[in-house]
Image (cartoon, helix red, strand yellow):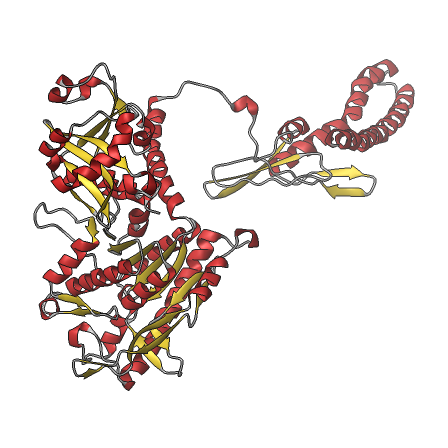
Amino acid sequence: KVQREAALSTVPHLVALLTCDLCFILPSKILFKRVEREADRSRFVSRARVTKIGKPVKMGFAMLPSIALVLVVLATKALGFMPLSLSSRGIKPTPLVLNTMSEDASVQVEPSESSLTYNQTMANGANTAAFQPLSDKVALSTFDITGLDPASIEIVQMETTEVSKQAQDRMFVNMFRGSANYIANHRNTVAVYHIPGGLLDSNDPNLCRDLMNDIALTWLLGMKIVLVVGCRHQIDKRLKDRQTPNGLHVTDQNALRVVKEEAGYVRFEVERQLARALRLHGGTSKENNDGNVVSGNFYSAQPFGILNGVDYMYTGFVRRVEVDKIRQVHNGHDICLLTTLGVSPSGEVFNVDSESLAACVAGALGASKIIFFTEQNILVRSKDHGGQVQHLRVTDARNLLAYNEVEVEKRGIVQLGKKVIEQEPAVADVLRKVGYSNVALDAGVKRAHIIAPTHGSVLQELYTRDGSGTLISRDLYEGIRRATVDDISGICDLIQPLIQAGTLVDRPRARMEQEIDSYYVYTRENLVVACAQLKRFENSFAEIGCLVVSKDYRSQGRGDAMLGYLERICLKNNVKDVFVLSTQTMEWFVERGFDMVDVPRLPPSRQATYNWERNSKIYMKHIDGDRELDASELWWNR
């Protein structure tokens, strides 16, 4: 199309040039005919001399139109004027094609009728314009500005700097691969987040925003979220003289009015921040199935009453959780938001402790986890080694509460003793969260997390092996203990069929009695349903053998529980490498992180007793720490 228009546009120019030439040639001929006649009459100038001089003059007159046209084109190009083209509809400016890229700006407009190309370049803040011939324009318009000229592409060997950059990128790849299992495991699970009111009034304006962004990201990765937001911080700032016997606030009529105001404030503040974060991560199109924040009356409350002679008035606790309504919110791909104001069936309003509310809701929903955020950067640390306590069993948490004189009332209310009240408020806050974590775990929640509100802490806690806070989990190893002589009969009943099948080596009863301290059993109602043996060797090695689960209790996580229990014993005794010998069940151990090794990898004393005729395969696993074992529990305890 461009070539056709370019050819047609030259016809008017040729017609104009011929017309100008004729207009100059005809008058020049008439003029010189008259000069020749006058020369014939003159005595001083001959006709031959006039003819000799007139030929070049006439040629010069004939070339004047062409010379003039060239000068006009050169002048317009030098001065930057827009050229004019002739068409059947008259003289008009030619359309422009902007297709020159610069460091600062570049734009292209497709031509409808064009004959020239205009290059616009913005450099150093100044605009310059230049014209290119038609041939350049045709070549440049062949490729779109968003495309790439194949002539500019070459295939070369990767340089050293690019290799090092790929090594840095590999760190992200490994991290993302390590998070894949966590993402898959947490998808479609219910998580209850408790957000203290102090985070909303933090001096760092980015703290709450980043936290909402991370919570929205967990929603995007498939978690079903319930948010419980407290307002104790805001109430304490307004009511300085509140009664707090045993760490539980008394709510009178005046305090209830303040609670209503501050509960409304924190609710709308969280809704505002979280709605922005959901749009940021979920997009704005309908195809992305946008999530919303839904708040309402999703639970009923009742008065706490009088305890130890103290009337708590409008302080209440959870009476019933509307589980079906919350699940309807989750089915709509939305987030449920709860505040501390609960309504009784009679219409009374009560102030419910936010941590207690979060624990009750998590237990009623059968949540996979409950997550408590601290108001300050608090670390649960061990006095023995000075490192962070990353994991607590529920029994360990109970012992910690008892040591600090913290009691859990039968209705699920945590009461702080005098020893805790005299400590720093941040310490009391963490112990209160440990108490309500126990309440949630006793109600059926699998795991509780206590996390400091640092940048990205919730993502690190949920989607990495090392985590960022303290995990409290139910005692998955309840029923596992060291075997006694009375358990030998039950152990023999378990292992005898496998000995007859050749899967296990025969173990004489007398030898088992001698080594009974190395055996562990899993009992249920005084019946041995699983057993295993753990032998320790030199150089921080240990061997797990005779791992057997009753046929009636298989595929229920009993074998995983026995293996995890023995691995934790090894870790507590500074044993880092655990190995097994197997002829039939190799794949089971491979699925649990064991790798096949050769006989020289065994400790020397075990190499000396290796049975070459049986030719068992050796599988070994290196244990890094508690978090690795926590992660393995996550896979089988779903």
Residue 345 falls in image quadrant = bottom left
Q: Position of residue 2 (x, y in %)?
A: 73, 32
Asked whether residue 465 appears in the rendered view, the answer is no
Asked whether residue 55 appears in the rendered view, the answer is yes
308 vs 634, left or right, is: left
Residue depicted at 30% across the width and 53% down the height: 446
Q: Nearer the viewer, residue 37 or 64?
A: 64
Q: Nearer the viewer, residue 42 or 174?
A: 174
Q: Position of residue 631 (x, y in %)?
A: 29, 42
Q: Is residue 318 above or below residue 502?
A: below
Residue depicted at 77% across the width and 23% down the height: 60
Residue 95 falls in image quadrant = top right
Q: Is residue 58 above or below residue 292?
A: above
Where's the N terminus, which quadrant?
top right
Residue at the extreme bottom of the image, as rendered: 253
Q: Position of residue 14 (x, y in %)?
A: 81, 29
Residue 293 falls in image quadrant = bottom left
Q: Is residue 11 above or below residue 289?
A: above
Residue depicted at 40% across the width and 60% down the height: 274
Q: Is residue 208 above or below residue 623?
A: below
Q: Position of residue 368 (x, y in %)?
A: 35, 53
553 vs 101, left or right, is: left
